[in-house]
Image (spheres, coloured by chain):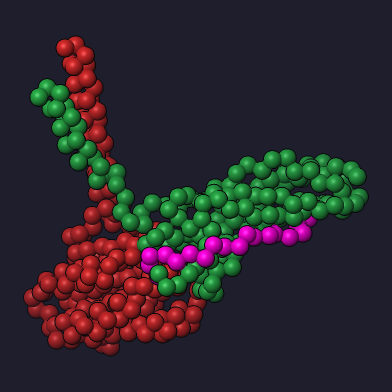
Chain colours: A green, B red
Amino acid sequence: MTRTLPVLLLLLALLFVLPAFSQGPGEKLPSVTMAAVGKVQVKAGEPVSVELDFRIGSEFHINSNKPKSELLIPTVLKLQAAEPVSLVAVKYPAGQDVAFPFAPNEKLSVYSGDFAITAVVKAPPKAAPGEYPVTGELRFQACDRSACYPPRSISVKFSVTVVGR
Amino acid sequence: MKRNALLFAALLIAIVGMLSAGKYLNRVRQHSPTKMVGDVRGLAAPNFDLATLDGRRVKLSDYRGKAVLLNFWATWCSPCKVEMPWFVELQKKYGNDGLVILGIAMDDSDAPKIAQFASELGVNYPVLLGTDQVSEQYGNVEFLPTSFYIDRDGKIVGKGTGLLGRSEIEDNVRKALASPVAGINNAQTSATPPKTQPTAQ
């Protein structure tokens, strides 16, 4: 009895406290984070691909860059590179075609879990060696299994070191 | 014996701590500036004045005496698209009993695009253009769909966040319809706001 009483009291307390902490459907906010980018070296005159790794919080998905409807908001990465570095291309991964419980007959093109976007940058042949920042933002619109969240952006930043040929 | 006493004391501290935390969180929710977070049942639904897709102005108070289903949605919200045909059916089924469904589009898209989307889904109830202000009034609507069920007296009787089942939505509609208001002529049941100058309440 002396052992069970504290346990019972603890369970009783949990009954009171858990509802206060609990979140209803759609009440947990989605997160997308970007992993730190390692050292990026660019030989003047030669393009280089930079992989940008993103992680979407569990239970959430975001539209791919090519969602299946024009009404859906695509994931878009916008970058600006400091002169003399320039952005050549942004390459998005293909989305996964997934049917969700809210529309079992319709497949959406989404990213979930980890995904990578490749940015191709280059510096002109006569670029001065040095470190140059590339900044921008990733815009996305997330949903979970029963709710969607307004579009959001996170900042994206990495540096490019230009070296001589 | 000494070990049991220590264990008991630790558990007691944990219990008191958790109860205090629970009480504190509930108090924070109830005293939030908008008061529209947590359990909002029984609160007066904040009035608003929003534009319809065809440029008219609509106030919530125009519908006093009606049961109102206020649905926040967006064209980019796939779960919202699932609920809307149900709302169309419910508007047909309960319109004569005094149900008014108001869709609040939280899109950045322009009105014609929203109108086209609503038309394709056969929406038979007014769609209003949402604003940040109305979102704030209703506790910062962070996720869609979110619906508020408002009784004939302007009190919130239910809130649904995320996609609910059709039967759950209909139960909430019935709750909103259940409260009669003295002195209101419920025979006027069209989903269209009154053409005459409505009385703000």
Which residue occupies the extreme left position in the image?
A: B182
Q: Quadrant of residue B77?
A: bottom left
Residue B184 as seen in the image, left or right of residue A40? left
B199 vs A56, nearest the viewer? A56
Is A89 included in the stretch rendered in magenta? yes
Relative height, residue B144 to residue B52 (above, below): above
Taking the image as drawn, is residue A127 in sight?
Answer: yes
Q: How would you classify the magenta stretch by its main secondary structure?
A: strand
Q: Quadrant of the C terminus of chain B?
A: bottom left
Q: Quadrant of the N terminus of chain B?
A: top left
Number of marks in the rendered image: 0
A88 vs B43, nearest the viewer? A88
Relative height, residue B79 to residue A131 (above, below): below
Residue B46 as seen in the image, left or right of residue B120? left
In percent of width and height, residue B44 lies at 21, 63
Q: Which residues lie in the magenta part?
A: A86-103
Taking the image as drawn, is residue B133 in sight?
Answer: no
Residue at figure coordinates x 27%, y 67% from the top left: B165
Is A140 included in the stretch rendered in magenta? no
Relative height, residue A68 to residue A4 (above, below): below
In percent of width and height, residue A165 lies at 91, 45
Residue at figure coordinates x 42%, y 65% from the top left: A100
Which residue occupies the extreme bottom position in the image?
A: B195
In percent of width and height, residue A3 lies at 15, 23
Which residue occupies the extreme top position in the image?
A: B2
Q: Quadrant of residue B23?
A: top left
